[in-house]
Image: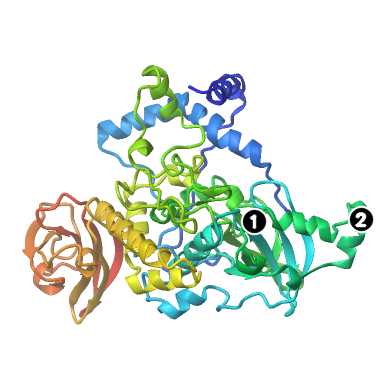
Amino acid sequence: MNRHEFLAIVLALALLPLAPDPRAEGVTVDPRTGVDHDGRPIVKPAVREKNLYAHQFREGVVEPLSHAFDVPDKLVWLSRQLTGGTKPQSVNVNRFDEVPNSTWFTNRNHLRAVTPDAVRRGPGDGIRPTPPYTIKSYKTSGMNPGFIIKDAADRRWVIKLDPSGHPQLGSGADVVVSRLLHAAGYNVPHDMAFTFSRGELKIDEDLARGEDGDRPFLPGDLDTLLTYGALGADDRSYAQASLFLDGAPVGHIDMSGRRPDDANDLYQHRDRRELRGLYVLMSWLGSWDTKDHQSLDTFIETQDSLGHVRHHLLDLGASLGAAAEGAKGERNGYEYRLDWGWTMKRLLTFGMAREPWRGGWQETGIPSLGNFSAERYEPDDFKPLMPHPAFGKRTARDGYWGAKLVASFSDAQIAAAIDAVGYEDPRVAPLLLRILTERRESVARYWFERVAPVDFFHVQAGRLQFRDLAVDRKLASPRAYRVRVSSSKGKRTAGAPSIQVLRATTISLDAIAAGANAIELEIGVDDDPAEPATVHLRRDGSDWILERVVHG
């Protein structure tokens, strides 16, 4: 146990009685719609500030200890184990077990493939900063020095310098990950990897004069600032440019609770599937610094000062093999900053416990890629820098949904996201493509072995049709499916079911309904332990209506 871990334990035990109970009841989404109508006009909510260090202490220390000493929670867990119960499921799913479109998420690639060119262009349709650039403000503290510019087209961009000696490392990781997350359905800024020369920069006159009591920012200060970043030929600087988001910022997302002054925000955020399932995508992409402060809510005004809140993920450069100071550390992605499990193992074994990162070193030897690999990657063992409330609540159904998004990406789409960076080192693109495609296969195999990947059910001409995503992804050969039918004449019943084994992804409903007006089907892969999908159907005249789908 190191000194920081020991001090954290002592301080946490002292403050433990102050930790409130974080649990709250969720609300169920309207199952009849594919849209969550959470963009209704509201008054602008208050700006919510959150101290980074207080947040890290709460999520990394207080919450784990509070959970450890929560006796009612342990009784619920024990009851669940004894009765075969499951974790509480996500609350915002529709009748097809999908996430409705909302101000949080828009269904894209897994429902309708995004073209590789659209993936490459990103959410901002490929626009780039246009020189010359006027520096409006700057930042020298923290791990990411940079500044805000206004370009010749009057657009504002946040500029973050790549770490010294690692051109295109952080900027490249951010561009690749943001392109893929946007294509999956998440709201992200439009980010670009670009270079600029010192001569393309000028300092805003107010900034140079030191308006509002600030210290003047002079040419010498700019020269010093640029030395912190990666420099290339002709002293060009490598950086990430992030286009300002639409709307007025109103603070970070609380990944656990909800925003009380937003009437559209109905669900506890830790119970939203798009946040629970995000774990699977961040595991795939190695996004190890995923927390509240890597997000931003903005208020989009629509009419007469009314509007709605839109929810974004941002600052995605701590992904793939990158960290703010260079190649990511060996523990990143394997342990929390303060990992109670490994702290106790190290304590009880006198430091002899062998952590998984010791056998999974990911060094590539490429400055622009850092430390990233597919070898020894375990999709469900990934850990971000600190515990994430929604990630900890994920169920197998949430994991399956996330894996479905990951599996939807083709090699060409992943290559397009990589191509958007414009890596100058010719070794990076082919190696990164291989790593991401191999990790994609690992993600799909892991979750499809737990929840049967039978999906996209629809009825046509009296036949229920579906797809096997593992077969589509060429992870499995065409195979047989076990169908359990529960029905009786006139109504569905829980009576003894009949079981059929089929070798096609289509089922004649009239043939198996035996005159019933409502049936429930459990459809899984034959001789496979993965949890089946449950499909509810009812007869409407001569037609069959798909009522509900539940995976797992």
Is residue 381 shown left or right of residue 489? right
* Residue 120 visible (yes or no): yes
Where does the image place residue 168, in percent across and percent down from the top left? 54, 62
Residue bearing mark 1: 229
* Residue 191 visible (yes or no): no
Callout 1–callout 2 Cβ contact below 8 Å: no
Q: CA distance from mark 1 to mark 2?
A: 28 Å
Where does the image place residue 406, in percent across and percent down from the top left? 36, 62
Which residue is painted at 49% across and 43% down in the image?
A: 388
Which residue is painted at 56% across and 78% down in the image?
A: 126
Element on which disc 2 rests: helix
Badge 1 local density, few (<14 within 10 Å), some, or many (20+)?
many
Q: Name above or below for residue 239 compared with residue 143.
A: below
Residue bearing mark 2: 212
Element on which disc 1 rests: loop
Q: Name above or below for residue 393 compared with residue 434.
A: above
Whichever of callouts 1 and 2 sits on the residue coming sooner in the sequence is: 2
Q: Amino acid at mark 1?
A: Gly
Which residue is painted at 35% across and 74% down in the image?
A: 412
Res 94 quadrant in image: bottom left
Spot the residue most to the front.
Answer: 234
